[in-house]
Image (cartoon, rainbow, N blue to C red):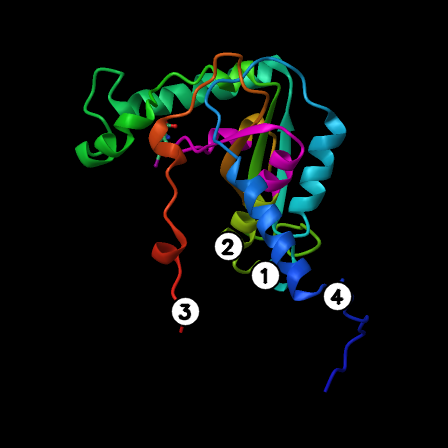
Amino acid sequence: MRDHETLPYALENLSHDESVARARAMRDRLRQRRTCRYFSDESVPREAIEAAIEAAGTAPNGANHQPWHFAVIQSPERKRAVREAAEAEERRFYGADGTDPKASEEWLGALRDLGTDADKPFLETAPCLIVVFAQRKGGIAEDGETQNYYVTESVGIACGMLIATLHEAGLATLTHTPSPMGFLRDICERPEWEKPLMIVVVGHPAKDATVPARAVEKKPLARIASWL
Ligand code: IYR
């Protein structure tokens, strides 16, 4: 019994051939995406960022509470503040502050051929940092009181759609997750019931940007899917 207001389910009806072609075309474009760790300072169009955030805002989510907020940082002062706080955490993570690393030997080993370290100059060089917040509470009214549901799952999916749309717009991205990252709440002036989930760094690759060879190796379909 549908006792709620409804609208017709509207979806383009494609032939099987067209469906396969569209899926493959999308796959092939997404295959071009590379996490970027070397950004230029070239600007990005604000309208592209806005559209990508609107795309992220269509993500499936718990009870349609849309439990996300995207804080777009462009000011050099706030970017510097993010960099300083993030690098302080990363120095503890890598043991670059002269103390024992917070990361295990195994974790540091897993990162070795990705070439990451505690220096995060891209947090200042890139034109735009999108700090993604998960609203633990707030409901649709964002009042900080009503319960939200499947918050991490919802915001994780939204981040995927954000990144895919930015890639489609020809922009390079990097997901960055300093830990802990509560400092982002203060820098972005967000309420205490919001939890920063990740920073999506957005811009253009530096002229001499490289990617680690290992990063382009993707597991084949047979290893990531099973048919039952
Ligand atoms: N947050 C650290 C470490 C790091 C962890 C993973 I897992 C990566 O895939 C990459 C980096 C850093 O940003 O350097």
Q: Which residue is mark 3?
A: 227
Q: Nearer the viewer, mark 3 or mark 2?
A: 3
Q: Is the C-beta separation of discs 2 and 1 under 8 Å? A: yes
Q: Residue at x 64, y 14 (%)?
A: 42
Q: Is mark 3 within 8 Å of ligand 1?
A: no
Which image quadrant is residue 181 in?
Answer: top left
Residue at (75, 64) in percent of width and height? 11
Is residue 103 among what the camera can see?
no
Boundaries of the magenta span = 162-185
Q: Earlier in the sequence, mark 1 or mark 4?
A: 4
Task: Tell whether 152 sits left or right of 46.
Answer: left
Front-lying residue, 61 or 219:
219
Q: Which residue is mark 1?
A: 62
Q: How far apart in space, not on screen, are marks 2 and 1 (Cα)?
A: 9 Å
* Residue 145, placed above or below residue 13: above
Q: Which residue is mark 2?
A: 153
Q: Quadrant of ligand 1?
A: top left
